[in-house]
Image (spheres, helix red, strand yellow):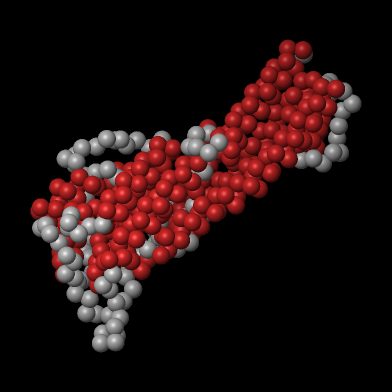
Amino acid sequence: MIALRVLSVAGGLLIVLAASMSVLATLVIPRGIPSRISVLVGRRIVRGAFLTVARRFDSYETKDRILALAAPVALLSIFATWLVLYLLAYALLIWGFAAGAFADAVRESGSSLFTLGFASSPRVAPTAVAFAAAATGLLIVALEIAYLPTIYGAFNRRETLVTMLESRAGTPAWGPEILIRHQLVGIVDNLAGFYADWERWAADVDESHTSYAVTVSLRSPHPLRSWVVALLAVLDSAALYNALAPERVPSEARLCLRMGFTCLRDICRAFGLPFNPDPLPTDPIALTFEEFEVAVDRLRAVNFPMERSAEEAWPHFKGWRVNYESTAYALADQTIAVPAPWSGPRRHVPGTYEPERPPHRRPDDIEGTQVGYERPKM
């Protein structure tokens, strides 16, 4: 019996240590340290359950509504798991230090952990454990309350530019459309500030989404928007601009590209997704030259200023895209983002959604039909 109680105390201490390390990694330490408990509960069990339900529906909008609940439920499940682990751990400690039934130890552990105070022991060791349990319960609840505004603040900052991108890139976002629409409405000179904003956005997302992994899975309010697809579209537009008009492109486009693929790599690293950290410009990419040529034809149709032909620009575009294509595709699949053009395949969502563009209406063209280009065939 004594040996069993020693094992109970040892087991309780190990569970306290494991739960505390998970809390520290998830809520306190500001870097992407994976927690086995969080990964098991949030990514595997809860996400797997929601994916199983979502697969039963054909409509992407329906899938999106179901999956929008996955991250919040995963977050609550992780919180609940920590509390259950602490409840069990302190019950094992109390039972190991005091004689009596294990059910009474669980009752005293719960009373202390949730600061209810209806059960206690007069003995010194169980009383010390009860104090530790009460302090733990208060600390965990306080950390969880402080954690929610932080992650939703990061989510709101992320979604602001993603929402603003609709008028510039269509829905879902597509890189060439950014250049097309800026040329159509005569605001190409605005692209320098646009890329500067997205460079800062990528830095903010890098910091927040590697520190608080659950934000990666929080879905946009609109089913056809996605932060991964949005960033990919911005990077594609910057790569296109650099490849087609190297003398005209603002320097902010290069800075945005660098910060953008750094952001994607850091998040992939935090999620354990494999990628090549130093690809060569000549390495192959999934996007084909034929798809690239279609985009160049659309740009030519709206008289976008180009200094190179599609054939001349392709090696340069490819040299930029090889830095971020695989990581963007992996995160788009991981987050089950809307399958937009140039965003790679999805294991759980078939097909591709063509961008929906707001009509380019003018007093002399109230239906917005004289835009100079056709909808892309994806």
Q: Where's residue 19, x and y in %?
A: 62, 31
Residue at the (74%, 24%) spot, across then down: 93
Residue at the (59%, 30%) spot, across then down: 21
Side (left or right) of 353 relative to 291: right
Q: Is residue 68 visible?
A: no
Q: Where's residue 63, x and y in %?
A: 44, 57
Q: Where's residue 175, x and y in %?
A: 28, 59
Side (left or right) of 318 relative to 34: left
Residue at the (77%, 12%) spot, across then down: 2
Q: Quadrant of residue 177?
A: bottom left
Residue at the (37%, 49%) spot, across then down: 332
Pick the front one: 127 or 37: 127
Side (left or right) of 373 relative to 226: left
Q: Is residue 192 above or below residue 256?
A: below
Quadrant of the drawing holding the N terminus = top right
Q: Where's residue 367, x and y in %?
A: 29, 83
Q: Is residue 81 visible?
A: yes
